[in-house]
Image (cartoon, rainbow, N blue to C red):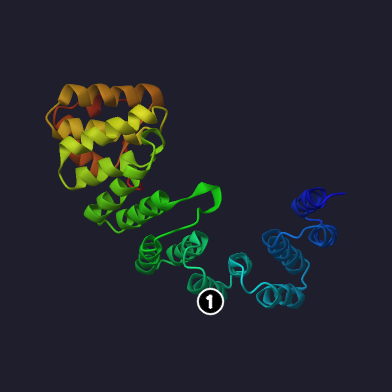
Amino acid sequence: MSFLSFARQAICEENKKNWTKAFNLYTRAIELTSNLSSKIKLIARKANCLDLVGNHKEAEKLIRDLEVLFPNHPETYLQSALYFINIQNTKQAKIYLHQGIEQFPDYLEFYLTLAFILKETERSNESIEVLKKALMQEKLTNGKGGISRKDIWAELGNLYFERENYNSCLACMKKSLRMAEKELFSFYDILAICYLKLNDLTNALKYIDLHLCYYEEVDPEAYILKARIHCLLGEYEKAKQILLFVYSREGVLNLSNEELRDLSYFVQNGFLDNLENFSIDEDK
């Protein structure tokens, strides 16, 4: 059997929770490859198998040994960090990621993983600083799934959006947009919301229309956003037709208090009262 055959069979056994069998197959696979990145990844998988059968000390020893065996490879620090994230030891994971960034400052996965940990532990300020540091590098490798600089700008924009810093969100998202293929950009709706929050209704309408152009089959939120913008522009008939479209497609119209404020014209003229299945969603 070849390296790939053993590796694939090992992954299959791991997915079936046959940890010991997977461990042995990973060992065979490692013996058949000279690719250091593959060796490191499979050793980390072996450690995961050991941990899952309760052999925590040996699992951690495998991970610690990576730094001795492959000190000059970025995967050593990434896979070690991922192992410790998996066993919920984020403190140790962050140590490995910081070491990785220090030695391999152009390796994007370190920044993305560290930013993710910080975001998940509600430390968004630090997450923002990590992504900013990544963007300061002249060169960056692509991350898993082809993640590149444009995606970092978008993630930075999302972090600012969550903090309700709409101007900074716009700046980051528009940098991402300039680097992206227009039909593959996924954040036109975020741009529209930011412009709405900043009372720039013309640009809000522009970007929600682009969102609906490229992503027509979306949840009703985008259409409701478009209706809100038309209503605030005094284009009540357009807003009404959009709300009726959402209602006919969903069979119900749920609005948040914020959405209701922007659509207050339809509260005042009784339009919403005539909808049998209209409700205010306090949790929306």
Visible in this render: residue 70?
A: yes
Visible in this render: residue 257?
A: no
The quadrant in which residue 186 appears is: top left
Query: In front: 152, or 212?
Result: 152
Check the image and report above or below for 28 versus 210: below
- Farthest-out residue, left: 234
Three-letter code for the amino acid on which mark 1 is drawn: Ile
The quadrant in which residue 230 appears is: top left
Tag count: 1
Rendered residue at 24%/29% (across/down)? 272
Check the image and report above or below for 268 versus 40: above
Residue carrying label 1: 95
Check the image and report above or below for 47 versus 8: below
Query: In front: 244, or 154?
Result: 154
Rendered residue at 25%/56% (across/down)? 168
Report the side of 154 relative to 270 (left or right): right
Rendered residue at 69%/63% (across/down)? 36
Q: Give coordinates of residue 57: x percent, y percent.
A: 74, 78
Q: Give coordinates of residue 136: x percent, y percent.
A: 36, 63
Q: Give coordinates of residue 37: x percent, y percent.
A: 67, 61
Check the image and report above or below for 72 versus 112: below
Report the side of 195 relative to 32 (left or right): left
